[in-house]
Image (cartoon, grey):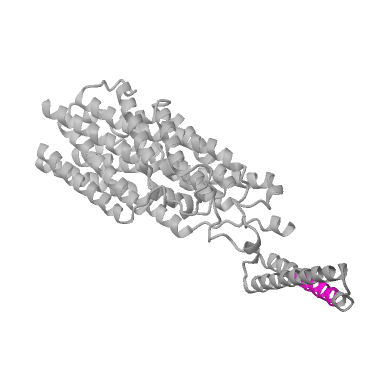
Amino acid sequence: METAALIVVLVILLALFFDFTNGFHDTANAMATPIATGALKPKTAVLLAACLNLVGAFLSTEVSQTVSHGIINEESISGQAEIFLPMIFAGLIGAITWNMLTWLLGLPSSSSHALFGGLIGATVVGVGFAGINFGAVLSKVILPALIAPVTAGLIAFAATKVAYGITRRYDGRPDGRSGFRWGQIFTSSMVALAHGTNDAQKTMGVITLALITVGWQSSSQADPHLWVIVACAVTIALGTYLGGWRIIRTLGKGLTEVKPAQGFAAESSTAATILASSAFGFALSTTQVASGSVIGSGLGRRGSTVRWATAGRIAIGWLLTLPAAGAVGAVAAVIVVWLGTAGVIVDAILALVVIVGLYLRSRKNAVTHANAMSDVAESGLAVELPENPGPTRRTTRIELARAQARAERKAAEAEKAAKRAKKLEKSVGKGPEVKAARKAAERAARKLAEAEVAAQEWERLGASRRARAELAEWDGTTEGEEKR
Protein backbone atom coordinates (compact mmCIF):
# COMPACT_ATOMS: atom_id res chain seq x y z
CA MET A 1 0.00 0.00 0.00
CA GLU A 2 2.89 2.34 0.74
CA THR A 3 4.26 1.71 -2.75
CA ALA A 4 0.84 2.45 -4.28
CA ALA A 5 0.62 5.68 -2.28
CA LEU A 6 4.07 6.73 -3.51
CA ILE A 7 3.09 6.03 -7.11
CA VAL A 8 -0.15 8.01 -6.67
CA VAL A 9 1.89 10.99 -5.51
CA LEU A 10 4.20 10.61 -8.54
CA VAL A 11 1.18 10.36 -10.84
CA ILE A 12 -0.34 13.51 -9.37
CA LEU A 13 2.93 15.44 -9.75
CA LEU A 14 3.40 14.23 -13.32
CA ALA A 15 -0.23 15.00 -14.16
CA LEU A 16 0.22 18.55 -12.89
CA PHE A 17 3.36 18.92 -14.99
CA PHE A 18 1.36 17.76 -18.01
CA ASP A 19 -1.23 20.40 -17.08
CA PHE A 20 1.57 22.97 -17.04
CA THR A 21 2.74 21.96 -20.53
CA ASN A 22 -0.88 22.01 -21.69
CA GLY A 23 -1.09 25.63 -20.55
CA PHE A 24 1.89 26.97 -22.48
CA HIS A 25 1.22 24.65 -25.41
CA ASP A 26 -2.31 26.01 -25.90
CA THR A 27 -1.88 29.71 -25.07
CA ALA A 28 -1.83 30.36 -28.82
CA ASN A 29 -5.39 29.11 -29.20
CA ALA A 30 -6.75 32.22 -27.52
CA MET A 31 -4.05 34.83 -27.93
CA ALA A 32 -2.21 34.27 -31.22
CA THR A 33 -4.64 36.29 -33.35
CA PRO A 34 -5.09 39.30 -31.01
CA ILE A 35 -1.30 39.51 -30.67
CA ALA A 36 -0.91 39.29 -34.45
CA THR A 37 -3.36 42.13 -35.08
CA GLY A 38 -2.10 44.30 -32.23
CA ALA A 39 -5.35 44.09 -30.25
CA LEU A 40 -3.34 43.05 -27.20
CA LYS A 41 0.33 43.37 -26.38
CA PRO A 42 2.04 39.97 -25.92
CA LYS A 43 2.59 40.00 -22.16
CA THR A 44 -0.85 41.49 -21.50
CA ALA A 45 -2.42 38.80 -23.67
CA VAL A 46 -0.87 35.85 -21.85
CA LEU A 47 -1.67 37.38 -18.44
CA LEU A 48 -5.32 37.78 -19.44
CA ALA A 49 -5.42 34.22 -20.79
CA ALA A 50 -3.92 32.85 -17.57
CA CYS A 51 -6.50 34.57 -15.39
CA LEU A 52 -9.40 33.38 -17.53
CA ASN A 53 -8.05 29.83 -17.71
CA LEU A 54 -8.00 29.85 -13.92
CA VAL A 55 -11.63 30.99 -13.76
CA GLY A 56 -12.77 28.60 -16.49
CA ALA A 57 -11.40 25.58 -14.66
CA PHE A 58 -14.06 26.05 -11.96
CA LEU A 59 -17.03 26.34 -14.32
CA SER A 60 -17.48 22.74 -15.48
CA THR A 61 -16.48 19.15 -14.70
CA GLU A 62 -18.17 17.37 -17.63
CA VAL A 63 -14.90 16.78 -19.50
CA SER A 64 -13.22 15.55 -16.31
CA GLN A 65 -15.92 12.91 -16.00
CA THR A 66 -15.32 11.83 -19.60
CA VAL A 67 -11.67 11.10 -18.74
CA SER A 68 -12.23 9.49 -15.35
CA HIS A 69 -15.50 7.68 -16.14
CA GLY A 70 -15.48 7.26 -19.91
CA ILE A 71 -12.22 6.36 -21.65
CA ILE A 72 -11.12 3.69 -19.17
CA ASN A 73 -13.39 0.86 -18.00
CA GLU A 74 -13.41 1.16 -14.21
CA GLU A 75 -14.53 -2.46 -13.83
CA SER A 76 -11.41 -3.76 -15.51
CA ILE A 77 -9.06 -1.81 -13.23
CA SER A 78 -10.93 -2.33 -9.96
CA GLY A 79 -8.57 -3.86 -7.42
CA GLN A 80 -5.56 -3.59 -9.76
CA ALA A 81 -3.96 -0.46 -8.39
CA GLU A 82 -0.48 -2.02 -8.40
CA ILE A 83 -0.83 -2.54 -12.17
CA PHE A 84 -2.87 0.39 -13.38
CA LEU A 85 -1.25 3.23 -11.42
CA PRO A 86 2.12 2.73 -13.17
CA MET A 87 0.18 2.59 -16.45
CA ILE A 88 -1.26 6.06 -15.81
CA PHE A 89 2.26 7.23 -15.02
CA ALA A 90 3.53 5.75 -18.30
CA GLY A 91 0.65 7.30 -20.24
CA LEU A 92 1.46 10.74 -18.86
CA ILE A 93 5.07 10.33 -19.98
CA GLY A 94 3.85 9.68 -23.52
CA ALA A 95 1.64 12.79 -23.45
CA ILE A 96 4.32 15.07 -22.01
CA THR A 97 6.98 13.86 -24.45
CA TRP A 98 4.75 14.61 -27.44
CA ASN A 99 3.74 18.00 -26.03
CA MET A 100 7.36 19.04 -25.57
CA LEU A 101 8.39 17.80 -29.02
CA THR A 102 5.60 19.60 -30.88
CA TRP A 103 6.24 22.74 -28.82
CA LEU A 104 9.88 22.65 -29.92
CA LEU A 105 8.75 22.32 -33.57
CA GLY A 106 6.16 25.08 -33.17
CA LEU A 107 3.32 22.75 -34.16
CA PRO A 108 -0.09 23.43 -32.58
CA SER A 109 -0.87 19.77 -31.93
CA SER A 110 -3.53 18.46 -29.56
CA SER A 111 -2.55 18.13 -25.90
CA SER A 112 -5.84 16.32 -25.37
CA HIS A 113 -5.10 13.64 -27.93
CA ALA A 114 -1.58 13.30 -26.59
CA LEU A 115 -3.06 12.57 -23.17
CA PHE A 116 -5.63 10.11 -24.47
CA GLY A 117 -3.08 8.41 -26.71
CA GLY A 118 -0.62 7.97 -23.86
CA LEU A 119 -3.29 6.56 -21.52
CA ILE A 120 -4.68 4.21 -24.17
CA GLY A 121 -1.25 2.88 -25.16
CA ALA A 122 -0.21 2.27 -21.55
CA THR A 123 -3.56 0.71 -20.61
CA VAL A 124 -3.47 -1.74 -23.51
CA VAL A 125 0.00 -2.92 -22.39
CA GLY A 126 -0.90 -3.18 -18.70
CA VAL A 127 -4.51 -4.35 -18.73
CA GLY A 128 -5.33 -5.27 -22.30
CA PHE A 129 -7.88 -3.98 -24.80
CA ALA A 130 -10.65 -4.74 -22.31
CA GLY A 131 -9.47 -1.78 -20.26
CA ILE A 132 -10.44 0.69 -23.00
CA ASN A 133 -14.00 1.86 -23.64
CA PHE A 134 -13.66 2.17 -27.40
CA GLY A 135 -17.25 3.38 -27.75
CA ALA A 136 -16.47 6.43 -25.62
CA VAL A 137 -13.16 6.93 -27.45
CA LEU A 138 -14.97 6.98 -30.78
CA SER A 139 -17.94 9.12 -29.74
CA LYS A 140 -16.25 11.62 -27.41
CA VAL A 141 -12.69 11.84 -28.75
CA ILE A 142 -12.26 10.76 -32.38
CA LEU A 143 -15.53 12.00 -33.89
CA PRO A 144 -15.27 15.45 -32.22
CA ALA A 145 -11.68 15.64 -33.49
CA LEU A 146 -12.93 15.17 -37.05
CA ILE A 147 -16.05 17.29 -36.83
CA ALA A 148 -15.05 20.20 -34.56
CA PRO A 149 -12.23 21.77 -36.69
CA VAL A 150 -14.37 21.59 -39.84
CA THR A 151 -17.37 23.06 -38.03
CA ALA A 152 -15.29 25.84 -36.49
CA GLY A 153 -13.70 26.58 -39.87
CA LEU A 154 -17.08 26.86 -41.61
CA ILE A 155 -18.44 29.13 -38.86
CA ALA A 156 -15.33 31.33 -39.05
CA PHE A 157 -15.57 31.46 -42.86
CA ALA A 158 -19.20 32.60 -42.71
CA ALA A 159 -18.54 35.05 -39.86
CA THR A 160 -15.62 36.61 -41.76
CA LYS A 161 -17.76 37.03 -44.88
CA VAL A 162 -20.49 38.70 -42.84
CA ALA A 163 -18.04 40.95 -40.97
CA TYR A 164 -16.48 42.24 -44.20
CA GLY A 165 -19.84 42.45 -45.93
CA ILE A 166 -21.54 44.69 -43.38
CA THR A 167 -18.47 46.94 -43.06
CA ARG A 168 -17.69 47.30 -46.76
CA ARG A 169 -17.77 51.10 -46.51
CA TYR A 170 -14.54 50.88 -44.49
CA ASP A 171 -12.63 49.08 -47.24
CA GLY A 172 -10.28 51.99 -47.70
CA ARG A 173 -9.08 52.12 -44.10
CA PRO A 174 -5.53 50.93 -43.46
CA ASP A 175 -5.02 47.45 -42.00
CA GLY A 176 -8.66 46.42 -42.28
CA ARG A 177 -11.45 47.23 -39.86
CA SER A 178 -9.33 48.36 -36.93
CA GLY A 179 -12.41 48.78 -34.71
CA PHE A 180 -12.61 45.00 -34.52
CA ARG A 181 -9.51 45.07 -32.32
CA TRP A 182 -11.71 46.06 -29.39
CA GLY A 183 -14.02 43.17 -30.16
CA GLN A 184 -11.03 40.83 -30.26
CA ILE A 185 -10.30 41.54 -26.60
CA PHE A 186 -13.71 40.14 -25.70
CA THR A 187 -13.65 37.17 -28.10
CA SER A 188 -10.10 36.11 -27.19
CA SER A 189 -11.11 36.30 -23.53
CA MET A 190 -14.01 33.96 -24.27
CA VAL A 191 -11.63 31.49 -25.92
CA ALA A 192 -9.32 31.56 -22.90
CA LEU A 193 -12.29 31.01 -20.59
CA ALA A 194 -13.51 28.14 -22.78
CA HIS A 195 -10.04 26.61 -22.77
CA GLY A 196 -10.13 26.52 -18.98
CA THR A 197 -13.50 24.77 -18.99
CA ASN A 198 -12.18 22.08 -21.34
CA ASP A 199 -8.45 21.43 -21.04
CA ALA A 200 -7.99 21.90 -17.29
CA GLN A 201 -10.67 19.26 -16.81
CA LYS A 202 -8.61 16.56 -18.50
CA THR A 203 -5.88 16.63 -15.88
CA MET A 204 -8.54 16.63 -13.17
CA GLY A 205 -9.92 13.48 -14.76
CA VAL A 206 -6.51 11.77 -14.75
CA ILE A 207 -5.91 12.54 -11.07
CA THR A 208 -9.44 11.43 -10.21
CA LEU A 209 -8.85 8.20 -12.14
CA ALA A 210 -5.69 7.56 -10.09
CA LEU A 211 -7.56 8.21 -6.85
CA ILE A 212 -10.33 5.81 -7.88
CA THR A 213 -7.77 3.16 -8.82
CA VAL A 214 -6.12 3.23 -5.39
CA GLY A 215 -9.45 3.40 -3.59
CA TRP A 216 -9.11 6.97 -2.28
CA GLN A 217 -12.24 8.03 -4.15
CA SER A 218 -15.39 6.07 -4.88
CA SER A 219 -16.04 5.23 -8.52
CA SER A 220 -19.62 6.42 -7.98
CA GLN A 221 -18.33 9.94 -7.28
CA ALA A 222 -17.95 11.54 -10.69
CA ASP A 223 -16.84 15.03 -9.66
CA PRO A 224 -13.19 15.64 -8.73
CA HIS A 225 -12.28 16.82 -5.24
CA LEU A 226 -11.99 20.56 -4.69
CA TRP A 227 -8.24 20.39 -4.06
CA VAL A 228 -7.82 18.64 -7.43
CA ILE A 229 -9.76 21.42 -9.19
CA VAL A 230 -7.72 24.15 -7.47
CA ALA A 231 -4.36 22.47 -8.18
CA CYS A 232 -5.15 21.90 -11.86
CA ALA A 233 -6.57 25.40 -12.33
CA VAL A 234 -3.51 27.11 -10.83
CA THR A 235 -1.07 24.92 -12.76
CA ILE A 236 -2.63 25.44 -16.18
CA ALA A 237 -2.87 29.19 -15.49
CA LEU A 238 0.84 29.33 -14.64
CA GLY A 239 1.73 27.44 -17.82
CA THR A 240 -0.48 29.77 -19.85
CA TYR A 241 1.20 32.85 -18.43
CA LEU A 242 4.64 31.63 -19.52
CA GLY A 243 3.28 31.52 -23.07
CA GLY A 244 4.07 29.03 -25.81
CA TRP A 245 5.60 31.66 -28.07
CA ARG A 246 6.68 29.21 -30.77
CA ILE A 247 3.12 28.05 -31.34
CA ILE A 248 1.79 31.61 -31.00
CA ARG A 249 4.02 32.54 -33.94
CA THR A 250 2.71 29.63 -36.03
CA LEU A 251 -0.96 30.37 -35.41
CA GLY A 252 -0.55 34.15 -35.48
CA LYS A 253 1.16 34.46 -38.85
CA GLY A 254 2.16 30.99 -40.05
CA LEU A 255 -1.24 29.90 -41.39
CA THR A 256 -2.49 33.18 -42.83
CA GLU A 257 -2.10 36.91 -42.39
CA VAL A 258 -4.66 37.85 -39.75
CA LYS A 259 -6.57 41.14 -39.86
CA PRO A 260 -8.73 42.41 -36.97
CA ALA A 261 -12.07 41.40 -38.50
CA GLN A 262 -10.64 37.96 -39.29
CA GLY A 263 -9.34 37.52 -35.76
CA PHE A 264 -12.69 38.54 -34.31
CA ALA A 265 -14.51 35.98 -36.47
CA ALA A 266 -12.00 33.18 -35.75
CA GLU A 267 -12.04 33.72 -31.99
CA SER A 268 -15.84 33.88 -31.88
CA SER A 269 -16.05 30.59 -33.76
CA THR A 270 -13.46 28.94 -31.51
CA ALA A 271 -15.15 30.04 -28.28
CA ALA A 272 -18.61 28.95 -29.42
CA THR A 273 -17.39 25.51 -30.51
CA ILE A 274 -15.38 24.82 -27.34
CA LEU A 275 -18.07 26.00 -24.94
CA ALA A 276 -20.72 23.90 -26.69
CA SER A 277 -18.47 20.84 -26.62
CA SER A 278 -17.61 21.32 -22.94
CA ALA A 279 -21.31 21.40 -22.10
CA PHE A 280 -21.75 17.98 -23.77
CA GLY A 281 -18.59 16.53 -22.22
CA PHE A 282 -16.73 16.22 -25.52
CA ALA A 283 -12.99 16.21 -24.81
CA LEU A 284 -12.06 17.88 -28.06
CA SER A 285 -8.81 19.56 -28.96
CA THR A 286 -8.95 23.32 -28.53
CA THR A 287 -5.86 23.51 -30.74
CA GLN A 288 -7.62 21.83 -33.65
CA VAL A 289 -10.65 24.07 -33.23
CA ALA A 290 -8.50 27.24 -33.12
CA SER A 291 -6.47 26.17 -36.16
CA GLY A 292 -9.63 25.35 -38.11
CA SER A 293 -11.09 28.75 -37.24
CA VAL A 294 -7.96 30.60 -38.38
CA ILE A 295 -7.95 28.74 -41.71
CA GLY A 296 -11.68 29.38 -42.18
CA SER A 297 -11.26 33.10 -41.52
CA GLY A 298 -8.34 33.20 -43.96
CA LEU A 299 -10.51 31.68 -46.67
CA GLY A 300 -13.32 34.09 -45.83
CA ARG A 301 -11.37 37.31 -46.42
CA ARG A 302 -10.95 38.36 -50.01
CA GLY A 303 -7.30 38.84 -50.87
CA SER A 304 -6.08 36.63 -48.04
CA THR A 305 -3.82 33.63 -48.63
CA VAL A 306 -3.81 30.44 -46.57
CA ARG A 307 -0.38 28.80 -46.37
CA TRP A 308 -1.39 25.24 -47.09
CA ALA A 309 2.13 23.88 -46.59
CA THR A 310 2.00 24.95 -42.94
CA ALA A 311 -1.57 23.71 -42.63
CA GLY A 312 -0.43 20.35 -44.03
CA ARG A 313 2.35 20.07 -41.43
CA ILE A 314 -0.16 20.81 -38.68
CA ALA A 315 -2.60 18.22 -40.05
CA ILE A 316 0.14 15.57 -40.11
CA GLY A 317 0.87 16.42 -36.49
CA TRP A 318 -2.80 15.92 -35.66
CA LEU A 319 -2.83 12.50 -37.30
CA LEU A 320 0.34 11.39 -35.53
CA THR A 321 -0.54 12.70 -32.06
CA LEU A 322 -2.76 9.87 -30.83
CA PRO A 323 -0.63 6.95 -32.13
CA ALA A 324 2.73 8.61 -31.35
CA ALA A 325 1.82 9.45 -27.76
CA GLY A 326 0.27 5.99 -27.48
CA ALA A 327 3.50 4.37 -28.68
CA VAL A 328 5.62 6.29 -26.16
CA GLY A 329 3.14 5.45 -23.40
CA ALA A 330 3.22 1.78 -24.42
CA VAL A 331 7.04 1.69 -24.35
CA ALA A 332 7.06 3.29 -20.91
CA ALA A 333 4.46 0.74 -19.77
CA VAL A 334 6.54 -2.15 -21.09
CA ILE A 335 9.48 -0.94 -18.98
CA VAL A 336 7.21 -0.99 -15.92
CA VAL A 337 5.92 -4.49 -16.76
CA TRP A 338 9.47 -5.80 -17.11
CA LEU A 339 11.04 -4.07 -14.10
CA GLY A 340 8.09 -3.60 -11.76
CA THR A 341 8.32 -0.68 -9.35
CA ALA A 342 11.89 -0.02 -10.46
CA GLY A 343 10.48 0.56 -13.95
CA VAL A 344 8.61 3.60 -12.66
CA ILE A 345 11.90 5.09 -11.50
CA VAL A 346 13.55 4.26 -14.83
CA ASP A 347 10.65 5.87 -16.69
CA ALA A 348 10.91 8.96 -14.53
CA ILE A 349 14.64 9.31 -15.22
CA LEU A 350 14.21 8.78 -18.96
CA ALA A 351 11.35 11.30 -19.06
CA LEU A 352 13.46 13.85 -17.18
CA VAL A 353 16.35 13.38 -19.65
CA VAL A 354 14.05 13.82 -22.65
CA ILE A 355 12.31 16.90 -21.21
CA VAL A 356 15.57 18.61 -20.23
CA GLY A 357 17.12 17.72 -23.59
CA LEU A 358 14.22 19.22 -25.56
CA TYR A 359 14.27 22.34 -23.39
CA LEU A 360 18.01 22.87 -23.86
CA ARG A 361 17.58 22.35 -27.60
CA SER A 362 14.92 25.06 -27.65
CA ARG A 363 17.34 27.59 -26.12
CA LYS A 364 19.51 27.52 -29.24
CA ASN A 365 16.85 29.47 -31.13
CA ALA A 366 14.75 30.86 -28.31
CA VAL A 367 11.38 32.40 -29.15
CA THR A 368 10.03 34.90 -26.61
CA HIS A 369 7.37 37.58 -26.47
CA ALA A 370 9.92 39.97 -27.98
CA ASN A 371 10.43 38.06 -31.23
CA ALA A 372 7.44 35.71 -31.52
CA MET A 373 5.51 38.20 -33.62
CA SER A 374 8.14 40.33 -35.32
CA ASP A 375 5.51 41.96 -37.51
CA VAL A 376 3.89 43.72 -34.56
CA ALA A 377 5.33 47.07 -33.65
CA GLU A 378 6.26 48.08 -30.12
CA SER A 379 3.20 50.30 -30.07
CA GLY A 380 1.10 47.17 -30.24
CA LEU A 381 -0.26 47.99 -33.69
CA ALA A 382 0.12 45.49 -36.49
CA VAL A 383 2.28 46.56 -39.39
CA GLU A 384 1.98 45.38 -42.96
CA LEU A 385 3.32 41.89 -43.56
CA PRO A 386 5.46 41.28 -46.66
CA GLU A 387 3.07 38.55 -47.82
CA ASN A 388 0.27 41.07 -48.41
CA PRO A 389 -1.23 40.89 -51.90
CA GLY A 390 -0.07 43.59 -54.26
CA PRO A 391 -2.28 45.96 -56.25
CA THR A 392 -4.28 44.91 -59.25
CA ARG A 393 -3.24 46.02 -62.74
CA ARG A 394 -6.11 48.47 -62.81
CA THR A 395 -5.03 50.23 -59.60
CA THR A 396 -1.44 50.29 -60.83
CA ARG A 397 -2.51 52.02 -64.07
CA ILE A 398 -4.65 54.49 -62.13
CA GLU A 399 -1.78 55.48 -59.86
CA LEU A 400 0.66 55.77 -62.73
CA ALA A 401 -1.75 58.03 -64.58
CA ARG A 402 -2.26 60.17 -61.47
CA ALA A 403 1.48 60.45 -60.87
CA GLN A 404 2.12 61.35 -64.50
CA ALA A 405 -0.58 64.04 -64.44
CA ARG A 406 0.83 65.40 -61.18
CA ALA A 407 4.36 65.54 -62.65
CA GLU A 408 3.15 67.30 -65.82
CA ARG A 409 1.13 69.83 -63.81
CA LYS A 410 4.09 70.63 -61.56
CA ALA A 411 6.36 71.01 -64.58
CA ALA A 412 3.87 73.41 -66.23
CA GLU A 413 3.63 75.48 -63.05
CA ALA A 414 7.42 75.63 -62.80
CA GLU A 415 7.73 76.74 -66.44
CA LYS A 416 5.07 79.41 -65.95
CA ALA A 417 6.76 80.71 -62.80
CA ALA A 418 10.13 80.82 -64.58
CA LYS A 419 8.69 82.87 -67.48
CA ARG A 420 7.13 85.35 -65.06
CA ALA A 421 10.41 85.72 -63.19
CA LYS A 422 12.31 86.35 -66.44
CA LYS A 423 9.76 88.93 -67.56
CA LEU A 424 10.03 90.81 -64.29
CA GLU A 425 13.84 90.77 -64.47
CA LYS A 426 13.74 92.55 -67.85
CA SER A 427 11.36 95.26 -66.71
CA VAL A 428 12.77 95.95 -63.25
CA GLY A 429 13.74 99.37 -62.24
CA LYS A 430 14.11 100.25 -58.64
CA GLY A 431 12.04 99.71 -55.60
CA PRO A 432 9.28 97.11 -55.27
CA GLU A 433 9.87 95.61 -58.76
CA VAL A 434 13.22 94.20 -57.61
CA LYS A 435 11.65 92.46 -54.62
CA ALA A 436 8.82 91.08 -56.78
CA ALA A 437 11.30 89.69 -59.29
CA ARG A 438 13.35 88.10 -56.54
CA LYS A 439 10.24 86.42 -55.02
CA ALA A 440 9.13 85.23 -58.44
CA ALA A 441 12.53 83.63 -59.01
CA GLU A 442 12.37 81.87 -55.65
CA ARG A 443 8.85 80.63 -56.40
CA ALA A 444 9.98 79.34 -59.75
CA ALA A 445 12.84 77.43 -58.11
CA ARG A 446 10.41 75.82 -55.63
CA LYS A 447 8.02 74.83 -58.40
CA LEU A 448 10.90 73.31 -60.33
CA ALA A 449 11.96 71.26 -57.29
CA GLU A 450 8.36 70.05 -56.82
CA ALA A 451 8.20 69.09 -60.47
CA GLU A 452 11.41 67.07 -60.13
CA VAL A 453 10.01 65.24 -57.06
CA ALA A 454 6.77 64.45 -58.91
CA ALA A 455 8.71 63.14 -61.90
CA GLN A 456 10.85 60.91 -59.67
CA GLU A 457 7.70 59.56 -57.98
CA TRP A 458 6.19 58.75 -61.36
CA GLU A 459 9.36 56.95 -62.45
CA ARG A 460 9.45 54.95 -59.22
CA LEU A 461 5.83 53.89 -59.62
CA GLY A 462 6.45 52.93 -63.20
CA ALA A 463 9.30 50.63 -62.15
CA SER A 464 7.28 48.90 -59.43
CA ARG A 465 4.31 46.57 -59.72
CA ARG A 466 3.43 47.33 -56.08
CA ALA A 467 2.58 50.94 -56.83
CA ARG A 468 -0.36 51.07 -54.48
CA ALA A 469 1.65 49.86 -51.52
CA GLU A 470 4.09 52.77 -52.07
CA LEU A 471 1.34 55.35 -51.60
CA ALA A 472 -1.03 53.85 -49.04
CA GLU A 473 -1.36 50.83 -46.82
CA TRP A 474 -2.96 47.94 -48.60
CA ASP A 475 -5.41 45.66 -46.78
CA GLY A 476 -6.26 43.29 -49.60
CA THR A 477 -9.67 44.74 -50.46
CA THR A 478 -9.07 45.75 -54.06
CA GLU A 479 -12.62 46.95 -54.66
CA GLY A 480 -12.40 49.56 -51.95
CA GLU A 481 -9.00 50.74 -53.14
CA GLU A 482 -10.18 51.07 -56.73
CA LYS A 483 -13.16 53.14 -55.60
CA ARG A 484 -10.82 55.41 -53.71
Q: Is residue 29 above or below residue 10?
A: below
> Which span of residues is magenta-colored?
407-422
Q: In this image, 102 relative to 353: left or right?
A: right
Picture residue at 63% right of the left edge, 52% below the top:
174
Q: Position of residue 177 (x, y in %)?
A: 63, 46
Q: Does the image show residue 463?
A: yes
443 and 143: which is toward the camera: 443
Main SS of the magenta part reads helix
Q: Give residue 472's quadrant in the image.
A: bottom right
Q: Position of residue 401 (x, y in %)?
A: 74, 70
Q: Residue furthest bottom?
A: 426
Q: In this image, 203 relative to 305: left or right?
A: left
Residue 24 in magenta stretch: no
415 and 232: which is toward the camera: 415
Q: Is residue 137 above or below residue 371?
A: above
Q: Position of residue 287 (x, y in %)?
A: 42, 44
436 and 269: which is toward the camera: 436
